Image (tube, grey):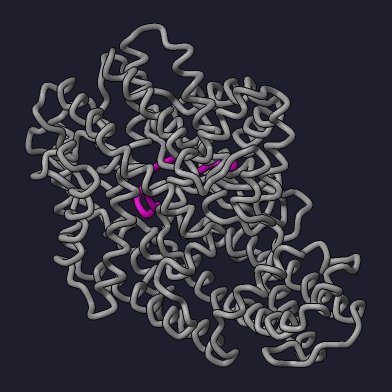
């Protein structure tokens, strides 16, 4: 990688290529493992309502045999899926990768059906509370997976019959998952003619590149990018509206048949929090809107405007226009991580040097950023669309937090790693906070400090104000989708309503973003609704933890790593309590929001 180039990730230590003998052997092995687990389930009559062996040792042995086989299967399956998806995510035109991804889906559905069968059986076993408890006391895999098994027993009450769950899993391939894939293809391949100079000369650019123009210092460029983006979404709104209707319709149908109380029921269980916690957090967020609106109005004044338009939300302010090349970003991030933990710094340096990151925006590559684990080699890979902005530096630091979190799982089984989104954002937010504090400490002028505060507040406003609008939007979509499909106009109207509820008089109501629903992939995940409030939880929980770190210093580090490693095996309230944090009380969330308000005050005072 030369100084000016942007890296692509390297998966060569996983498989040499999509068509390699090693990759084919991995798929063949996965099929064999699925066959073996089917045989094991049949041999031990593991099925909903099925018998279970008498005696604690025998029952623990039957449970443990499944756990060992499923963990091995999930480890291989996740590795192959990540490998294949790495090609799809960076080049949606790659038909070979898309075909192999399609071939993998039925195999992964088989694994899903096997787990459904086991979950139904555990629900039956758990009705004999004494026998189930005794089995979990036996040394071995059952005892090591006590939390997972307890959660399975609790959630088994929301299972349909085994036949119905199996059919739902198979139909998802041509239902919710198909809609999700279509949204990904449409959005990753969307391009539009863009006039960068305002001279009438246009060239075709990927939508991700146009979206990155929102950081441009020239308002005329930002406005043209905004108008071009909306026009582009206008062209593809009908298929995307069909996708969203399809996904939400499937979710509602399954929730009803599984006995869920509403659309929030399963997401809360997945997040491992209760409604009391969610309401405490949302209430504190809602109360913070007037403070954020002060920030929006203050930013408008800095830009010489009466009101902030949508294309100004990400605009830089101040005269500090520092632009990072990727090497500079790398060196800065590693250095700042070292002020917190040498282990974290060494880990990040290795991630950069081992080419775990794909940073170049390009046609066919999906937008945004993510981190994914590669369990067979105990590594991670990071996708971003690096443009040299401070925002993207923080994005890389954020995703490295996810990778560090994955690293803390080394040696844990796949079932012990299942972390809810609420806790999955902990390390990423922590990393962002480390880098932001370092930037503020090192600022050489008020103009530079202003730029850094701006970057932080842009992100915080997205996670608090915009996330709340996305929560309101999705909640309303579910309520209306229960009666009928929604049109593209309906989705746009709801998005504008939700943005009005949260941004209020902080933004010019003439210039909002009616198509936020179209390009955010989070809405199109059939297995994970309300992929929004966990981000707010992650930011505010991470800030709260950072405050604890500032009080305790280096003594905090071992507990922090233990929290990350244990996040797959505990509920959020219990894990937080170890740090003296009560997430059911609004006071905790308000305390974290007070830290953001203090930065807003600093910003307005400059």
- Quadrant of residue 313 in the image? top left
Q: Nearer the viewer, residue 20 or 586?
A: 586
Q: Is residue 206 left or right of residue 9?
A: left
**Percent position (x, y) of residue 394?**
45, 32
Q: Nearer the viewer, residue 142 or 240?
A: 142
Q: Is residue 494 magenta?
A: no
- The residues colored magenta run 356-367
Q: Residue at the spot x=42%, y=66% of the render? A: 264
**Percent position (x, y) of residue 563?**
68, 43
**Percent position (x, y) of residue 147?**
72, 63
Q: Residue at the spot x=37%, y=23% of the render? A: 599
Q: Residue at the spot x=43%, y=47% of the render? A: 281
Q: Is residue 380 left or right of residue 219?
A: right
Q: Residue at the spot x=36%, y=43% of the render? A: 285
Q: Is residue 359 magenta?
A: yes
Q: Is residue 173 visible?
A: no
């Amino acid at each position: 990688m030369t100084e000016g180039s942007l890296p692509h990730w390297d998966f060569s230590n996983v498989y040499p290529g999509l068509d390699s003998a090693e990759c084919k052997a991995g798929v063949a092995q996965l099929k064999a493992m699925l066959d073996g687990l089917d045989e094991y389930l049949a041999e031990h009559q593991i099925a909903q309502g099925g018998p279970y062996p008498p005696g604690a040792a025998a029952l623990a042995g039957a449970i443990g045999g499944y756990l060992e086989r499923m963990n091995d299967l999930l480890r291989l399956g996740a590795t192959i899926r990540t490998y294949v998806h790495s090609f799809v995510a960076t080049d949606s035109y790659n038909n070979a990768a898309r075909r192999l991804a399609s071939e993998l889906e039925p195999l992964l559905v088989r694994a899903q059906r096997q787990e459904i069968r086991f979950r139904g059986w555990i629900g039956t076993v758990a009705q004999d509370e004494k026998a189930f408890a005794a089995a979990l006391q036996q040394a071995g895999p059952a005892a090591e997976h006590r939390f997972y098994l307890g959660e399975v027993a609790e959630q088994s009450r929301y299972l349909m019959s085994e036949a119905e769950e199996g059919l739902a899993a198979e139909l998802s391939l041509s239902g919710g998952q198909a809609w999700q894939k279509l949204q990904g293809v449409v959005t990753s391949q969307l391009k539009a003619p863009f006039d960068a100079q305002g001279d009438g000369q246009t060239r075709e650019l990927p939508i991700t590149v146009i979206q990155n123009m929102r950081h441009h210092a020239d308002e005329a460029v930002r406005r043209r990018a905004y108008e071009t983006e909306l026009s582009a979404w206008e062209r593809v709104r009908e298929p995307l509206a069909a996708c969203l209707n399809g996904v939400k319709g499937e979710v509602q149908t399954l929730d009803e048949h599984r006995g869920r109380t509403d659309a929030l029921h399963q997401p809360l269980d997945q997040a491992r929090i209760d409604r009391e916690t969610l309401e405490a957090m949302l209430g504190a967020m809602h109360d913070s809107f007037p403070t954020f609106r002060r920030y929006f109005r203050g930013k408008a004044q800095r830009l010489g405007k009466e009101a902030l338009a949508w294309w100004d939300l990400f605009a830089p302010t101040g005269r500090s226009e520092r632009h990072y090349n990727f090497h500079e970003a790398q060196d800065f991030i590693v250095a700042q991580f070292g002020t917190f933990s040498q282990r974290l710094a060494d880990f990040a340096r290795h991630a950069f040097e081992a080419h775990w990151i794909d940073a170049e925006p390009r046609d066919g590559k999906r937008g945004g950023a993510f981190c994914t684990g590669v369990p067979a080699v105990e590594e991670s890979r990071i996708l971003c669309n690096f443009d040299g902005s401070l925002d993207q530096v923080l994005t890389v630091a954020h995703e490295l937090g996810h990778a560090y979190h994955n690293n803390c799982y080394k040696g844990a089984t796949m079932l012990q790693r299942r972390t809810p989104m609420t806790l999955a954002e902990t390390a990423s937010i922590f990393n962002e906070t480390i880098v932001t504090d370092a930037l503020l400490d090192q600022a050489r002028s008020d103009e530079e400090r202003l730029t850094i505060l701006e970057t932080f507040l842009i992100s915080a406003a997205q996670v608090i104000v915009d996330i709340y609008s996305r929560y309101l939007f999705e909640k309303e979509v579910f309520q209306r989708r229960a009666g009928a499909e929604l049109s593209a106009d309906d989705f746009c109207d709801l998005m504008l309503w939700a943005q009005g509820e949260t941004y209020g008089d902080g933004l010019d109501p003439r210039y909002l973003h009616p198509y936020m629903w179209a390009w955010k992939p989070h809405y199109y995940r059939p297995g994970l609704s309300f992929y929004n409030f966990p981000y707010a939880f992650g930011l505010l929980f991470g800030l709260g933890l950072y405050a604890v770190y500032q009080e305790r210093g280096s003594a905090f580090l071992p507990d922090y790593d233990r929290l990350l490693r244990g996040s797959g095996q505990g509920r959020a309230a219990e894990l937080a309590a170890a740090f003296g944090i009560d997430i059911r009380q609004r006071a905790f969330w308000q305390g974290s929001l007070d830290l953001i308000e203090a930065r807003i005050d600093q910003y307005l005072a400059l």
